[in-house]
Image (tube, rainbow, N blue to C red):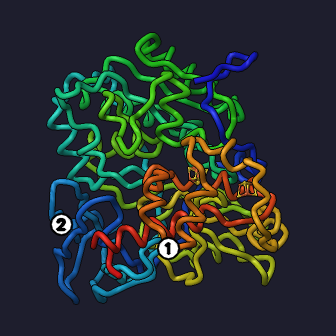
Amino acid sequence: MTTDSQGRSTFTGGVHPPDSKHLTEDKAIAPGPPVKELAIFLSQHIGAPCQASVAKAAMVEAGQPIGECQGFVCAPVHAPIAGKVKEIALQSHPVLGRSPAVTIVAEEEVQPAAPSFQRPDAFDPKTYNREQICDAAREAGLVGMGGAGFPTSVKIHHDAKPAKHTLLVNACECEPYITCDYRLMLEWTDQVITGIELAQRACGASKVFIGIEDNKPKAIETMTAAIQKLGLGGAMNVVRLETKYPQGGERQLINAVMGEHVPTGGIPPMIGVVVLNVATAAALAEAVINNQPLTHRVVTVTGEAIANPGNYYVAIGTPVQTLIDFCGGVTTKSAKVVMGGPMMGQAIADLNTPITKTSGAITVLTKEQIGQAKFERRQTACIRCGRCLEVCPENLNPTSIAHAVKSNLLDVAERHFIGACIECGCCSYVCPANIELTGYIKTGKIFLARQRKQMPA
Ligand code: SF4
Ligand code: SF4
């Protein structure tokens, strides 16, 4: 952990890309596009994929489970709308290429209506027992909505070895362009805080920190005021962090807020910490208080190449094309569509790709933005400047790992801790030779997973 002259906490390394949040930060959450046909993936989480629990031609109700768990680390999926199961077939997936999904067709278009959450009067999380909260999270199919997709019920489960002492709410949203969590903190403040209290109750943490970057002063102000008003100050604290990418990486956040290190290759619970995303906290409140499964989420549709950027409450399974059309379409032919933000997102070619539980944004970049992000510049030889080493938040040697992967020396890449790379893209971002270091590292990880038969060839 380092603290600068303004008292802001941060981690070592990282980069300062333009945050580009001005496009959507003042856009209130609005209902997303009306939908008639949705494709809901059976795997939207880390862990075992679900098995379809409905058959082709079956009629389903809105909120009905359509995919059931096949293991402990799993999260069921639900129908966002009522309708008929058209098919259970492979659909374009932003990461897996193709993945099985249940397609539901409604009789007529349905427009999502944002939930009206009401924090119960004199709410006391102690009136819920821990198992009750975990069960509600599991039945609602909650997963980490910041991108990782780890099943929430597993994450918040009380564990004695080691006991979970701290709940750390990841409210950084450090990825450029994205503002969905920011808007949730401003507009659904009570819901987010209620979800945080329930997560704290479930995991048994005595301390709660909410880490927010200082480019979101309104969020810092709103959350701090709400915590004070509810009388939660002392046990729940907002921490102002330096605006730096990837401040929202779990390991970087823990280091910045608590000054602790998660062991290489380890996960936060190993040191007694649970990290929860803002949207996940909001969804937990809905699941426990309103018994609502995770069928919709807020998505930022942004980028210089989209006509009407904004933050929308969208049905999971909505095709990206539908969302883009709803936002007035793309303004240039040479745009690049990214699921997520420009640093860690996945470029997608098939615009029928459906929104998932972890899709926080669709970013549509112009050719100029793509150029600025260095994706299209000519690659030259490494000049051994060391900049990639300086910015790596995991203290890795990106150039050595990339060189090993390029030479098909995966054992050497492993000796350089390829598995510890969080794929943040900082090394590629600063490389003056335009070497796509992160791309080589991701490829190396895929080759290793195939060697170990953890992934299909
Ligand atoms: S090696 Fe991995 S963790 Fe390090 S900067 Fe590159 S992408 Fe980020
Ligand atoms: S930043 Fe690029 S040019 Fe510099 S050492 Fe790393 S790979 Fe080589």
Figure quadrant of residue 182: top right
Residue furthest right as drawn = 368
In percent of the image, x 24 and y 45: which residue is there?
A: 153
Residue 87 point in image, percent of width and height: 29, 88
Residue 310 point in image, percent of width and height: 67, 58
Where is 440 relative to 262, above or below?
A: below
Q: Residues within 10 Å of mark 1 (few under 14, many from 20)?
A: few
Where is 224 relative to 386, above or below?
A: above
What is the C-alpha distance between the residues marked 1 and 2?
Answer: 39 Å
Badge 1 or badge 2: first in the primary sequence? 2
Nearest to the eye among marks 1 and 2: give it.
1
In-image side of 49 versus 325 (left or right): left
Q: Quick check: can you spot residue 269? A: yes
Disc 2 target residue: 68
From the image, which quarter does the N terminus lie in?
A: top right
In percent of the image, x 78 and y 73: which residue is there?
A: 376
Disc 1 target residue: 408
Residue 244 point in image, percent of width and height: 68, 38
Using the image as rendered, state which of residue 393 and residue 91 is in the foreground: 393
